[in-house]
Structure formats: structure tokens, C-alpha cells
Image: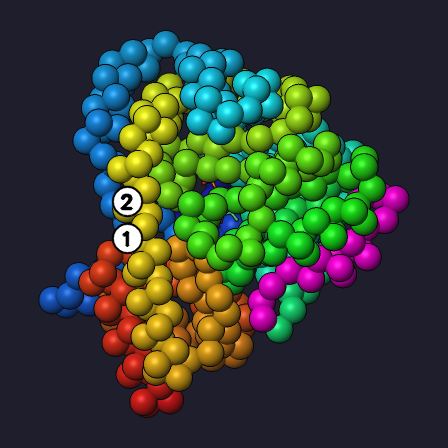
Amino acid sequence: MSEPTTTDALPGPRIREVLSRLPAYVPGKPAAAPEGQTAYKCSSNENPYQPLPSVLAVIREAAETINRYPDMAVSELSQAIADHLDVPVECIATGTGSVGVLGQVIQACCDAGDEVVFAWRSFEAYPIVTTIAGAVPVTVALDEQQRHRLDAMADAITEHTRVVLVCTPNNPTGTVVHDDELRAFLTRVPQDVLVVIDEAYLEFVQDPDAPDGLTIWREHPNVMLLRTFSKAYGLAGLRVGYAVAHSAVAAALRKTAVPFGVNSLAQVAAVESLRVRDELQERVDHLVKERSRVADGLRDQGWELSDSEANFVWFDLGDRSADFALTCEESGLMVRRYGDDGVRVTIAEPEANDRLLEICERWRREG
Ligand SMILES: *Cc1c(COP(=O)(O)O)cnc(C)c1O
């Protein structure tokens, strides 16, 4: 703890009251190894693999010119994304990670007191970003399979609702919404309410019933997609994400962006990552195989799991969550505990996944 400064006892500037009620964003713990063991960080859903050499090369090269501001319009990257997805470039808006883009969305759509509907548990950034913008989070509990209850979410829409967030796969439970459910839901959402489909884990999805976000987007003027380079593309440390939005929404997102927010290293790294995406997808496919191996192994041990389509698994442990998380950490596996709801563990390199299976086996035996 640092020493209090001499002015701490004096009345200072008034800070918005809402900030004192904000849930804190808990970052994943860094890896800490017990004696003689390797530790694995499975607490932040990161890609366990280093950037590809060609991505590192463009970052190194761009580092030489970071005395200059980045391209404020993020032109080359936006064009590369538009080409990759075959959408008009005016439908792409970038930001400092997709969390940054989400902040732009709320600022673009919500005045003070407007409502943002989302499932819970879902991504912990949702209530934070919503509350900071002065909007009001309205949460709808997941069902017993840890899936979105889209019907109940449609019921929760009022005249004050401006945005609905649909997280698929859902962080932290891994479940996806299905195409038919999503389409039925969209028929119930008023045209002036923006539906944001957060597809942070899109590249890991294999369920044939999962929606094709781009098709849904093309067919619905009030839908936008949120995507990121942080997970499958392995650029979490550079902070770059984007929206696929109809042009009026995308234009609004550009207005609420932090000027020069997407830095020059992030821009070139993302462009190069799109160029070598087949090579990156091989790594994603490998992680998906590992996910199946872990889920099958856990089910063989007798665990009941929700169906994860992302790069993590969810342990619905209730008040045993703290105990389980501690056991994992004592064995060198850093995991993410969510209060007394459960524990999320990222699928990582095979040795980390083996470690998880061992811990889980021991936990059940000693139960
Ligand atoms: C990780 C994650 C993101 C991406 O965050 P970035 O800001 O792009 O790093 C967005 N949504 C969900 C649900 C996530 O889990």
C-alpha cells in the first residue's frame, strides 16, 4: 500500500456516484507455479500460443514509427476485414478490443436511464460498460443448461430498452444460441432496439445449429456483430476488435470511438493475422479438439457439463467454487472463479488440459 497523500483528508472533486456501485472487472490471475511445476494461465480465455513469426515481424517493423500517430481511420485494417467478410467497408467500425467497441455502442445508443438487456451470467464487462455510460443493466437469468432464455429476454424489453446483448458462445458458460431461437427472438424485438451479437469465440464454434451471424446481420437492420482479434487470433495484448454494423450504426460507432484508439501495432498485426488466418485456424482447430478431449474426459469422470462451443469449460459448482479454484491454483492451474456460481477454465496447451483432467479426477475421488 502506498502512503496516503496529504490531501486525502480534504474534500476533493465530486466523482459520479454510480462509479462506487460498479462491479469490478476481475482480470485473470497470472500463472504462479508451485515448487518444481510449470504453471498455466487458464483464467483469461487467451490463446496459449505466441503470435506467428510473420505477425511478430510486422509488429517489430511498425514499432520503429510509433513516434507517429496511427491511421485514425484504421483504413487498411477496415478494408481487410471488409474484404475478408465480403461486406462494404462502411459497415466496419473498429475499437480498442471488442469491449472498447461495446462501450462505443452504449454511448451511441443510450442516454442516462436507458436500458440494456443481457443474460446473466454472461460477460462481466456488460454491467460495467453499461453502468459507466449511465445506462441501466437489465439482466435475465440463464436457464438450467446455462443457455440464454431468449424468450424471457424479449419479455424484458420495455420502451426504455435501447440495446440487447446476445453473447454466443456465452462467456463464461460456453453455450450458443440456436439459429431458430435467434430468428424467433428477432421477430419480437422492436426495430429501434439494437441487437448486438457478441461473437468473441466465433472461430471455436462447431454446433451446426449455431446461427451464421453475417446472414442474420444481412437480414436484420437492427442487428450488429461484435468480433475480436483477442481470442482465436491471439492478439489480446494489442486491444483490437470490430463491429459489423449497418452503415448508420457503424457511423455512430466511429463518432463515439476514442480518437486514434486502435494503435499502429494493433492495426498492422490484425491485417497480417487476417492474411495468415488459415494458419491461425489450424491452431484454433487444435484447441477445439482439445476442448472435446477435455469435455469427454470430464464426462467419463462423471462430471455434468454444459455444452461449450468456446475455448473454455464451465464448472457449475455453486458454493464449492472457491474450494475448486483453490485446488486448481495449488496445482499450478490458474482458473477464473465467479463468486459462488462456478469456475471457468480456459482450454490451453495439452499439458495444461492434462493437468485439469488430473485435478478434476482427484477432486471427484476425494470429493
Ligand atoms: C474476451 C471477450 C471479448 C473480447 O474482448 P476484447 O476487448 O476484444 O479483448 C468480448 N466479448 C466476450 C464475451 C469475451 O469473452
- Identify residue for label 1: 286
Dot 1, crowdedness within 10 Å: few (<14), some or many (≥20)?
some
Q: Residue at x 58, y 67 (%)?
A: 146
- Extreme-front residue of the structure: 208
Q: Is residue 107 or residue 118 the one in the foreground?
A: 118
Q: Residue at x 24, y 56 (%)?
A: 349
Displayed quadrant of residue 294? bottom left
Displayed quadrant of residue 133? top right
Q: Is residue 307 or residue 114 the one in the foreground?
A: 307
Q: Position of residue 68 (x, y in %)?
A: 37, 9
**What kind of element bears circle 2?**
helix
Q: Amino acid at mark 1?
A: His
Dot 2, crowdedness within 10 Å: few (<14), some or many (≥20)?
few
- Identify residue for label 2: 282
Q: Residue at x 35, y 64 (%)?
A: 292
Tell me: 359 left or right of 126: left
Q: Residue at x 44, y 12 (%)?
A: 71
Q: Where are the magenta residues, as a range?
A: 145-161
Q: Is residue 310 magenta?
A: no
**Count of numbered circles on the image:** 2
The quadrant of the image that shows the C terminus is bottom left
Q: Position of residue 178 (x, y in %)?
A: 61, 56
- The correct choice, above or below, for 162 with respect to 124 in the image is above
Q: Amino acid at mark 2?
A: Glu
Tell me: 114 left or right of 203: right
- Extreme-bottom residue of the structure: 366
